[in-house]
Amino acid sequence: MEKIKVGVLGSTGMVGQNYLCLLENHPWFEVSYVAASPQSAGKKYEQAVEKRWHMQNDIPSSIKELVVGDANSLERALNECSFVFSALEMDKEKIKKLESRYAKHIPVVSNASAHRWTNDVPMLIPEINPEHLDIIKEQQKKHKFKGFIVVKPNCTLQSYTIPVGALIKSGYEVNKLVVTTMQALSGAGYPGVSSLDIIDNIVPYISGEEEKNEQEPLKIFGKIEDRKIVPKRIDISCHCNRVPVVDGHTACVSLQFGNKMPELEEIIQIWNNFKSVPQELELPTAPKQPIVYRAEIDRPQPIKDRDIERGMVVSVGRLRECNIFDIRFVALSHNTIRGAAGGAILTAELLYAKGYLK
Ligand code: NAP
C-alpha cells in the first residue's frame, strides 16, 4: 500500500517531536514535510532541534535531513503532503486563522485549542465520540473547505473522560464531577516551568486549564443537533496543579450519577471490558484495552502506568464510594502520547478508516 504523505506543523516542539517518533514506520502514514516557526525554517531538521531534542529515541533517520518549512506559508505543505497534524504553539487567533487557511485545501488534525469551541469542528476522543465526525460535511459546506479541521481536546481530561464516557455509554447518567489534577512538566512544552519553580514544589495554577477541563468534556459528551454539536449538561469543578513529574497527567475524581448508581464491581467490569470503534476497526495505534483498572491500593502511578500499550491506555484505580458524591477514583494518562500526538494519530487513523483521508 502506498503510504499517505503527512506534514507536521510545530514539528520542532514537544508534541511535534512525539509525532515524528510515533509516525516512524507507521503502516499508513509517512512524514514528508516538517514545519515550525520562521526561526527554524530553512534549517535541516537535525540542526533546528539541536540541543532541544527531548525524545528517548534518536531523530528518525528519514527526518534528519528534511528542510524545515515555515508553518505560516502553505505552498510547500500543499505540494508535499495530503494532510497535516498541527502542534503549533502561538497566539490562539493566529492558529485559528492559519488552520482554517490549511483546511481550505487539505485536512488538519490539531492539538491546539484554537478551534475546540468552533461548533462545527469535532473535538474527538476516538473511543468516546467517533460519531461527531459526521459534522465534517457541514463544516466543509459552510466554510467551502476542500479539507476540514478536527481537533483533540485538552491533554489532561483524556485521563477521566474516557472512564466517565465508558459509564455514560453503558447507560449511566453523570450529573457532577469534582476533578483535581496533578499535571506533568512535559505538558508545558519546552523550556516550560523553570526548575526553581517546580523542584521540591507544587504549583497550584495552570493558566486556562481549569476552564478547559470544565467545558471541553461537555462538547465531547454532546450530540449533533441542528447541524452543530450541542454540549451535554454536566457540572464540573476542577483544580489544576503542576507537579514535578516528567510525563503523565493524573486526576482524582469524585462523581455523582443522575439516574441510578452501579455497583463498584460493575463499574470495574465496564472499564476493563470497554471497547469502541478504534478497537473494532483494529486501528494501528488503538490500545487493545483502552481502560485498565489497577486493583492495587496505590495505583495508578505515572512512572509505573503511563507507558502501558505504548502510552495509549488510561489507567484507573482506587475506586471507592464518596462521602459527598457517589464514587471517587484516580485516573492517569500519558499527556504527550494519548493526550497529544498519539491521540491525534488515532484520530487520523479513524478518519482514514472512515474514508475522510484520501
Ligand atoms: P512547544 O514545545 O512550545 O512547540 C511549539 C511549536 O510551535 C514549535 O515547533 C515552534 O517552532 C512552533 N511555533 C512557535 N511559534 C510559531 C510561529 N509564530 N509560527 C509557526 N510556528 C511556531 O509546544 P508543545 O508543548 O509541543 O505544544 C504544541 C501544541 O499542542 C500547543 O497548542 C499545546 O497547547 C498543545 N498540546 C500540548 C500538550 C503537551 O502535553 N505538551 C498536550 C496537548 C496539547 P520553533 O521551534 O521554530 O519555535
Image (cartoon, grey):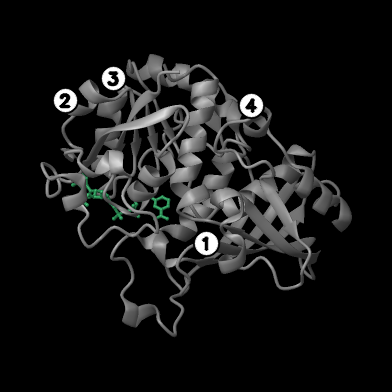
Of labels 2 and 1, earlier in sequence is: 2
Q: Which residue is mark 4?
A: 281
Q: Which residue is mark 2?
A: 75
Of labels 4 and 1, earlier in sequence is: 1
- Compute the Cα span from label 4 to label 3: 28 Å
Position of the N terminus by quadrant = top left
Determine whether the residue tagged by mark 1 lies in a helix, strand or loop.
Answer: loop
Of labels 4 and 3, earlier in sequence is: 3
Q: How many marks?
A: 4
Determine whether the residue tagged by mark 3 lies in a helix, strand or loop.
Answer: loop
Determine contact: label 3, label 1, CB under 8 Å. no
Q: What numbered label is drawn on residue 105? A: 3
Between 76 and 134, the one lying in front of the other is 76
- Compute the Cα span from label 3 to label 1: 35 Å
- Compute the Cα span from label 2 to label 4: 34 Å
Determine whether the residue tagged by mark 2 lies in a helix, strand or loop.
Answer: helix
Q: Which residue is mark 1?
A: 248
Q: Quadrant of residue 84?
A: top left
Residue at x 63%, y 37% (from the top left corner): 127
Between 19 and 200, the one lying in front of the other is 19
- Compute the Cα span from label 3 to label 2: 11 Å
Query: Measured from the top left, where is residue 244 in percent x and y?
Result: 45, 75
Indicate the amino acid at tag 1.
Gly
Q: Nearer the viewer, mark 4 or mark 3?
A: 4
Q: Nearer the viewer, mark 3 or mark 1?
A: 1
Residue at x 20%, y 41% (from the top left corner): 65
Indicate the amino acid at tag 2.
Glu
Q: Quadrant of residue 8?
A: top left
289 left or right of 226 in image = right
